[in-house]
Image (cartoon, rainbow, N blue to C red):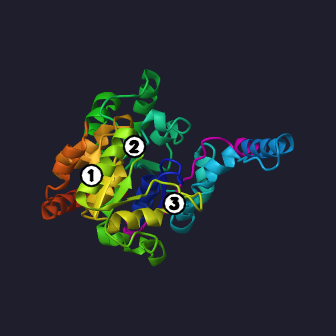
Amino acid sequence: MKIGILTQPLGVNYGGMLQNWALQEVLKQMGHTPITIQLRGIPKWKTDYYRCCAVLRFYLKKLIFHPTRNIEIRYSRLSAKYRDMRKFVKRRITTTKPLFGISLKKLRPYGVDVCIVGSDQVWRPKYNKHNFGAMFGDFLGVGSDVRCISYAASFGVDEWELSPRWTAIARICISGFSAVSVRERSGVELCRQYLGVEAQHVLDPTLLLKSESYAGLLSETEIRKLPKEPFVAVYILDSSEDKKRIVEQLSRKLGLITYNIAEIDSVSGLLPSTELWVAAIHRAAFVITDSFHGTAFSINFHKPFVVLGNEARGNGRFMSLLGMVGLVNRYISDATSESAYDIAVKKINWDEVEHVLNDNRKKSLGFLKDALQ
């Protein structure tokens, strides 16, 4: 079966790319042919227009200011830093050409039989301003021969954020889904209360695959870039002075150096590749993160970790995952180095964690198989 995956735009988020890759791998193992539908936030002509304006500004500044002045093209520089990350999409993820907006007509050349919406925060308005309607299948229409389901779709938070208008639209559109699943336990109640549908709680796609399934991403070239001595992998999305202090003090107490996998390389000006990001967590002695997927990979790779609170990005995601595997105590909302260290030195019973994950893998894979029949 040809399956189109609708998710957040790829290329600037490690977790977003890896959950998409994992879902494609799972679907291939089931015998399906997946393809990710690339959605543009803005039309191509606007992207080209912004790029041309940036180049013109650069050369105008070169004419106006002294030629030795350090002038950079802001637009190009911001875009370029993701170059190594984006290579992952080209090498490992099957995609359509970039589409501005989606319709059955645009999908027809790809022969899609079923659309899967998910994972990541596809149902959170603030993270999906341009293609929000598509994530509820508003392009399908009545009597469409293309079915739509959701797999591990996420609202990101425990409270309802959709406006009354979007709630009404989403309620109508999602009634046409043949199966609905969400990534957070709280999402089950949100779907029932506001959308009038019964949803099943399932695992994030990255957790459907066991840790050994990521071996193919661990290239020796990337591994050689990692520190030779034991290290703390630090993946902080929203840095602050408090978080920096905790990372520094906790690493010192653990007797480990730090390796920041959210930091731009001073020589290349690039963020680490996606393969290097995976390798860093896989080889780390300890992980400090405020990221959902940083947490998910720490659990999957059986790495001791602490999660620093990140309320702006949605605590519900963390509480759902950590609560499921019995590790809520690894989450720190009001962190001090002392409380972080107390948590860090507590042993994790990985056999129990893996038992829970295996049970939930079976349930989640069962949902996906049944939904695609």
Say which of marks 2 and 3 sits in front. Answer: 3
- Furthest residue in direction right, as rendered: 63
Residue 179: percent from the left, percent from the top?
Answer: 34, 47
Say which residue label 3 marks. 35
User: In front here: 323 or 167?
Assistant: 323
Residue at which label 1 appears: 250
Residue 282 position, x and y percent, is 33, 67
Q: Residue furthest top?
A: 164
**Distance from label 2 to label 3 (Cα)?**
19 Å
Task: Tell me which residue sits at (44%, 57%) in the image.
Answer: 20
Q: CA distance from mark 1 to mark 3?
A: 42 Å
Residue 113 against residue 92 in the figure, above or below: above
Name the image quarter holding residue 25.
bottom left
Mark 1 residue element: helix
Q: Residue at x 79, y 41 (%)?
A: 57
Which is closer to the viewer, label 1 or label 3?
1
The mark tally for this picture is: 3
Asked if residue 315 is among those painted magenta in the image, a careful observer would answer no
| Element type at mark 3 | strand
Of the image marks 2 and 3, the number of the one nearer the N terminus: 3
Q: Residues within 10 Å of mark 3 (few under 14, many from 20)?
A: many
Please provide the residue range marked out in magenta.
26-49
The answer to whether the residue labelled 1 contacts the one labelled 2, judged by CB atoms less than 8 Å apart, is: no
Q: Residue 240 in the image: state x and y as whole percent.
A: 40, 39
Secondary structure type for disc 2: loop
**Amino acid beneath label 2:** Phe
Compared across the picture, whether 184 is left or right of 277 comes to left
Checking the image for residue 177, the label placed there is: 2
Q: State which mark lies toward you, 1 or 2.
A: 1
| Image mark for residue 239 | none
